[in-house]
Amino acid sequence: MGDKHVPVTILTGFLGSGKTTLLNRILAEQHGHRIAVIENEFGEEGVDNDLLLQERDEQIVEMNNGCICCTVRGDLVRILGDLRERRDRGEIGFERVMIETTGMADPGPVAQTFFIDDDIADYYLLDAVITVVDARHGERQLDEHKEAQEQVGFADRILMSKVDPVDEPTRERLQARLRRMNPRAPVRPVRFGDAPIAEILDIRGFNLNAVLEIDPAFLESDEHEHDDAVQSFVFRSDKPFDPLKLEDFLSGLIQVYGPDMLRYKGVLYMKGSDRQTVFQGVHMMMGADAGRHWKPAERRSSRMVFIGRNLPKDTFIKGLEQCLA
């Protein structure tokens, strides 16, 4: 992916989590980025549109064309295509795009758009999914709404908002739950949307060559206080994979479990290769890339993280073990 690609950030989080506060702060800050904003409203018109307009200046392009979700993915493709044409004609200038999803949205279909449509993939680069979780109501929302769980599962970064009114044990309990659900996404507390720009933009969370982040403390505790539908697990092995066996097994997995596999990612040790293999997927779409060379004294190993809805961990682990050379 060269510099010609326009980076895109998906901002998600449950209703009232503080997404618009965060977005307004980003738009108001003097950071020098020219940002096009796509508002994903639930229903014909939304209040968020008016809130954003208060902070608007000439660097913001805003398009409010209804809900971006599974059923109207074509709308998002059309909006992104229109932005591209207007930019190429010199009518508008922007360097990046932010998509704010509605609080009830599963961000998966929005993310998939950047892989399914060739024209979009040639012009835009999906940089990251940023999920905002309300520290005060997050536990209850995760208990009651699968959308809230899916938003956490898809995240490359999790921002915990409204931390001031919440006591420390409540905060720590929520943080531990979020890390269990998604060990690859750092969790950061934020106050009134005050998160460093460097932790939101240009983090390459969706780039195949990005560093694989798995919380090292994730496997130290088997204590599960919540029966969350969205959970994660890690596969590790010092033995190399047989490439053909692994490809067959992963292809079979996504045929059966693809709709419930939210994010999966790994750095793999392949038989016969002196380089790492970096792979990741979103639902039914999976890709792999040659990574860096293994260092001479480095212990070669594979590690893969799977985040999904009611995935049969034992089936995955046993199947992957069968693929080792």
Image (cartoon, rainbow, N blue to C red):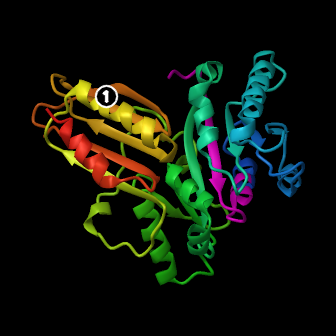
Say whether residue 269 is left or right of residue 135. left
What residue sits right under mark 1 in the picture?
247
Q: Say few, some or many: other residues with alpha carbon within 10 Å of mark 1 (under 14 / 14 to 19 / 20 or more).
A: few
The answer to which of 273 and 20 lies nearer the viewer is 273
Q: Residue at x 57, y 34 (%)?
A: 126
The local secondary structure at tag 1 comes to helix
Return the x and y of residue 203 as percentages of the image width and height.
50, 42
**Residue 10 within the segment the image draws in magenta:** yes
Q: Nearer the viewer, residue 10 or 180?
A: 180
Q: Is residue 105 visible?
A: yes
Magenta-highlighted residues: 1-23
- Residue drawn where x is 21% and y is 33% of the image: 269
Q: Residue at x 42, y 28 (%)?
A: 287
Q: Quadrant of residue 81?
A: top right
Q: Nearer the viewer, residue 113 or 183?
A: 113
Q: Is residue 3 magenta?
A: yes
Q: With 214 as the anchor, is 44 left or right in this view?
A: right
The correct choice, above or below, for 39 with respect to 79 in the image is below
